[in-house]
Image (cartoon, rainbow, N blue to C red):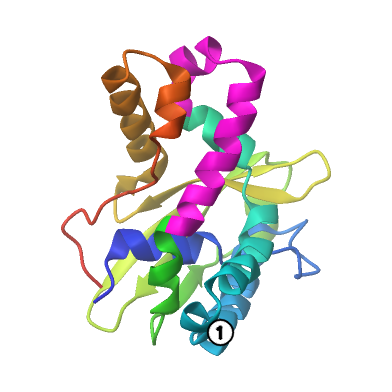
Amino acid sequence: MLTLLKNFFTVLILSSSINLWSDENPYNFIDSNAQKMVIVLKENKSLFLEDRKLYEQKIKEIFEPMIDFRRVAATVMGKKYYLASSKEQRAEFVVIFKDSLLDTYAETLAQWENQTITTIFPKNMEIQTNNLKNIEVQQTLNTGSSKYPISYKLRKNKDNSWSIVNIIVNGVNLGLTFRNQFQALAIKNNGNIESTLNGWVSDAGDAGISG
């Protein structure tokens, strides 16, 4: 049985720059590519056991361009530890955070079955998207037995494309969850940034919710 918060990563990577409207419309950016990625997951399900590295590479090629990992990683570190770290350590954590997410949730992605994702479009798209630098796009994840709300926090880039900077799943703020995890690990390591980075593993937990 899939857990909802592990399914979040499936939803999180369901976007790429394939959609022609993705740089202008954040709702299409999330929705159109989400449906495309569901197909990719189903078609490559057996690849997880046959060639895990190739399977992870297919996923990485899709989710990496659409998430602002630098901004997300800085938020996860928090102001205190971000300022205490070197530029090299900050760059190192971006890579560690990104790779750990993929390693943690690759198996969950391979279990994708008949779940569906529905994007909630606004009645007046033009009013909702004009001249905005930050926007929230909502979806519903239907596992067959339950429906859960998902809220994407997106930020517009200088080239007018959009990047996900946070996700809230059924009321659970994933950015805050990872930030609390980083702070707890840093405290455990007496504020030693390098030891904290070496011990990092992305895990949002189950939160008592199953799909």
Residue 26 appears in the picture as rendered: yes
Question: Where does residue 54 sit, x and y in percent of width and height?
Answer: 62, 73
- Residue placed farthest to the left in the image? 208
Question: Which stretch did the figure color magenta?
Answer: 77-103
Q: Is residue 32 magenta?
A: no
What residue is at 69 percent from the left and 50 percent from the top? Answer: 162
Vertical order, 61 against 54 (above or below)? above
Question: Where does residue 8 sit, x and y in percent of width and height?
Answer: 40, 61
Vertical order, 151 against 118 (above or below)? above
Dominant secondary-structure state across the stretch colored magenta: helix
| Front-most of residues 168 and 111 | 111
Residue 46 shown left or right of residue 37 in the figure: left
Residue 26 shown left or right of residue 205 in the figure: right
Vertical order, 172 against 9 (above or below)? above
Say which quadrant the C terminus sits in.
bottom left
Question: Where does residue 109 sit, x and y in percent of width and height?
Answer: 44, 72
Which image quarter: residue 74? top right
According to the picture, the residue beneath numbered tag 1 turns out to be 44
Vertical order, 94 against 8 (above or below)? above
Say which quadrant the N terminus sits in.
bottom left
| Front-most of residues 122 and 205 | 205
- Secondary structure at badge 1 equals loop
Residue 141 shown left or right of residue 11 in the figure: left
Which image quarter: residue 198? top left
Q: Is residue 90 magenta?
A: yes
Which image quarter: residue 26? bottom right
Q: What's the residue type where badge 1 is placed?
A: Asn
